[in-house]
Structure formats: C-alpha cells, structure tokens
Amino acid sequence: MSIVRVLGFVLVLPLILAAGEAPASRPAEVVSPEPRVPAFPIHDTVHYKVKYLGVTCGHVSFSGAMEDLDGRPAYHMIMTARNSKFFNRIYKVDARIDSWVDAETMSTLVYESVTTEKGETARERHEVDWDAGMVRSVEDGVETTMEFNSTEPVLDPLAFVFRLQALAKKGGDDITLTLLTDKGPVRTIATVRGPERKHTARGHRLLLEIEPHPADGKMFSKKGHVSLWVDPKDKSTLYILDFRLSFGHLVAKIK
C-alpha cells in the first residue's frame, strides 16, 4: 500500500492542474488578506500518522509560511508523504507537494510535486497565470500550455485544503471556493458542522468538521466521504483528515 498513491487519489481531486476553454477575467475587486488573520494557516511542520483499515501505513506532514516569490508576497504551503517503515520495505515511496498562492489575489501561482518511487523520481511544476487564464506545465521535462476560464481566484488541491482550514469559524457556515482540477475550475461548497468533542494526541478538542462538495453535487460522489477536522481556536490547526472510500477507511491524525 503506497500512502502517497492513496493520498494522491483522495486529496480533493486529481493533483494535476488543468484546462478549461477560454481566458479568465479578473474580479473587479480583490481583497487583500488581513495581516493579523492569515488567509492560509501559517505554522511550522505538523506531523500526522496515517492508518488504512486500522493499520499504520504512512506519515504525512503539513507546513505553511509567508515568503517572497518573484517579488510578490505569497503563501507557501508544503505537504510531504511517505510510507511507513514496514511498507517501505515492500514499496518505498516519498513525495513532496509545494503550493504558492498570491497574497493579494488569493489565487494559486505555482503548484509542484516531486515523487520518488523505487528510486525513480517524477517531477511536475504548474505555473498559473490567472489574469491570462493559462496554466504552463512541465512534467518530467515535457512542457505543455493549457487554458482555463474562471472569474474567481482558483486554488490547487493543497491550497484548497489550507484555505478551508482558515475559513472554518463555526458550525452552520458554508464556504465557497473554486478548485482548479484536471477538468477545469470547479466551484465548490464546503459545509461546516460542530463543534464536536474529539480525542486527539493533544488531548480532547472541540473540532469543526468541514465537508467539501461541488456546487453541482457531482464531485466526490464516487469517491466516498471526505472530512477535515480543525480547531478554529488553535491557529485553524488540522487535527484529522478522514476519508471513507469505496475500498476502505483512511484516516490521518495529528501526532
């Protein structure tokens, strides 16, 4: 069991950015993030243990920071994933995903991943020009250019997860975001429930459950139930990622 492959399958749609049909137009007004309330969680590396059908199969980490990207302030989010030591003996996999989001427009600038399986490394880098409605990609040395159409800022899958954490404040809220997928931009609505008391490695916490789904009701219908559990009072920290899939139950819990 490759934890990287499983996460790649269920982490909020395929991980390759992609295409639509026409250039995008920028919204008339762009809201800059409040400096004291980051639009994306900013924190040092947080580690998670991942279990599949009750068996530890891997480890995941997330971190977030503000930095300069080509002269513009950007949120930088990182996810790393690897199999557990036992599964690495069978099939060694390591992966890292980086996402940079423009701090002004709230739209993805760059999304890249590096995955090593059995000593072979695959690299992807996707540069998103929201104003032009264009994604410029390099995958294992092959360059492609794809168009997309969105009048709202678009987020890659990793940035999407981080943004949901930051926006969840109380039960009963609905969060609307546009996710950029290999089928083009998808408008999503996430339902926030709770809070609910959960036992974690850091003690009992009152957590909010975030369940993303598409505005048209079709996304995730064949992939099961996906939930994020966050503590809005603890820097919007993600405590649990819960995937109930057709082939089993995968859950990542904070260490």
Image: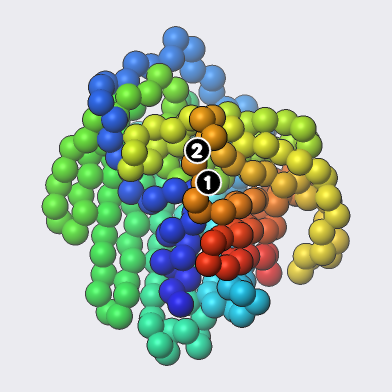
Q: Is 102 situated left or right of 140 in this image?
A: right
**What kind of residue is marked 1?**
Ser
Question: Residue visible at 85% across and 61% down?
Answer: 204
Crowd class of label 1 (few under 14; some 14 to 19; many from 20; radius 10 Å)? few
Q: Residue furthest top?
A: 28
Q: Position of residue 173 (x, y in %)?
A: 72, 31
Q: Position of residue 221 (x, y in %)?
A: 53, 46
**Quarter occupied by residue 239:** bottom right
Question: Residue visible at 47% across and 84% down?
Answer: 87
| Label ID, residue 218 | 2
Q: Nearer the viewer, residue 66 or 148?
A: 148
Q: Nearer the viewer, residue 224 or 197?
A: 224
Residue 185's place in the image compared with 131, above or below, is: below
Q: Position of residue 34 (x, y in %)?
A: 62, 27
| Label ID, residue 221 | 1
Quarter of the picture containing the C terminus is: bottom right
Q: Nearer the viewer, residue 82 or 65?
A: 82
Q: Is 170 situated left or right of 159 in this image?
A: right
